[in-house]
């Protein structure tokens, strides 16, 4: 926060009051963040079994007293094993949301609206009996439509079905770092995981800080963040350290359902292609800021080059 913001927030003039000596003046509100986890892909165990990965992530959330939102791909809970892995999330009070049955890309020209709607309902049929299921929908790859017609048709469908969009505010490439980590461990099970941890922490702070600054600039208030992470080995090993890091930076953990009460999640930016972080999409809708935005925002291209350079 610079000096000018400080005086604005405090409602005081720096000319009349010495900034350093002002007692009890409220600083800018601390960013709040929640954990929203996607996919529930447990069929790809590396280093830890699916049950161990599940337990590690649940234990991290328990230790931090955070209730997350888990956006489940329906086909991952079709088998009994998947249902059994999901049950403790429900018991621990985490929110369960819909992430389609088969994780199609809605922006692909061949994905039509009807097929996609059926995919959402097919996932709902598998998830709805979990008491912690809530009608929040997260678009796979955060792709909400490659045309205005598809975008608007899907918004109408979700609304008719009683769904709200479980938007992400802090997008990132945790999935790519996990892919690299998994590949390394497949080759060399004894490989040192610390460089991946260091990279991940730095990446997450960079992305969290970026989207937080963008949100404050675009929205003019301190949004309640929904951090995107995936159900993978990387987070089984290091999600706790991501949370610790954000706390150390002054960010406050909150539950995902509380985060979703923020008005930004009701925004319907009229951009095409639709999707990405909701903060990004709202920024995109505002022409002046849009010029500085990259698209796709987080498809991993930038991180791939950086990881290659480090030999990760
Ligand atoms: Zn996904």
Image (cartoon, rainbow, N blue to C red):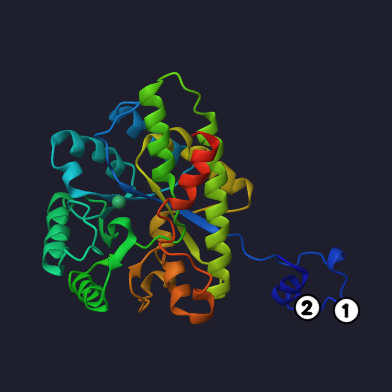
Q: CA distance from mark 1 to mark 2?
A: 8 Å
Q: Is residue 179 above or below residue 302?
A: above
Across and down, in percent, residue 6 comes to 74, 70
Which residue of the protein is positioned furthest toward the top in this rendering? 190
Query: Could you say which disc has been placed on residue 229 in the image?
Result: none
- Is residue 47 visible in this depiction of the protein? no
Q: In the rendered view, does 101 fall on the left or right side of 308?
A: left
Element type at marker 1? loop
Across and down, in percent, residue 91 comes to 29, 42
Element type at marker 2? loop
- Is residue 284 visible in this depiction of the protein? yes
Q: Are the residues tagged 1 and 2 within 8 Å (C-beta)?
A: yes
Q: Which residue is mark 2?
A: 12
User: Which residue is more in the foreground, 168 or 159?
Assistant: 168
Q: In the rendered view, does 207 fall on the left or right side of 126?
A: right
Q: Which residue is mark 1?
A: 16
Residue 235 quadrant: top left
């Amino acid at each position: 926060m610079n000096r000018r913001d400080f005086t604005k927030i405090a409602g005081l003039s720096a000319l009349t009051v010495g900034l350093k000596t002002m007692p009890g003046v409220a600083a800018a509100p601390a960013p709040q963040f929640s954990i929203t986890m996607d996919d529930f892909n447990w069929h790809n165990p590396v280093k830890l079994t699916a049950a161990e990965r599940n337990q590690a992530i649940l234990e991290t959330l328990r230790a931090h007293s955070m209730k997350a939102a888990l956006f489940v791909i329906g086909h991952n809970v079709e088998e009994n094993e998947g249902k059994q892995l999901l049950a403790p999330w429900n018991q621990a009070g985490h929110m369960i949301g819909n992430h389609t049955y088969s994780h199609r890309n809605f922006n692909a020209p061949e994905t039509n609206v009807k097929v996609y709607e059926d995919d959402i309902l097919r996932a709902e049929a598998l998830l709805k009996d979990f008491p912690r299921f809530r009608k929040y929908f997260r678009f796979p790859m955060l792709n909400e439509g490659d045309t205005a017609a598809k975008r608007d048709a899907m918004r109408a469908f979700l609304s008719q079905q009683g769904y709200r969009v479980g938007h992400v505010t802090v997008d990132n490439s945790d999935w790519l770092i996990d892919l690299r980590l998994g590949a390394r461990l497949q080759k060399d099970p004894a490989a040192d995981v610390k460089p991946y941890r260091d990279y991940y922490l730095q990446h997450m702070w960079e992305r969290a800080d970026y989207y937080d600054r963008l949100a404050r600039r675009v929205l003019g208030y301190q949004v309640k963040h929904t951090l995107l992470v995936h159900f993978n080995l990387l987070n089984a090993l290091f999600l706790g350290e991501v949370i610790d890091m954000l706390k150390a930076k002054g960010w406050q953990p909150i539950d995902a359902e509380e985060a979703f009460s923020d008005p930004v999640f009701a925004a319907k930016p009229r951009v095409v292609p639709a999707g990405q972080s909701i903060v990004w999409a709202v920024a995109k809708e505002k022409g002046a800021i849009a010029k500085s935005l990259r698209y796709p925002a987080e498809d991993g291209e930038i991180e791939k080059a950086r990881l290659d350079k480090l030999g990760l």
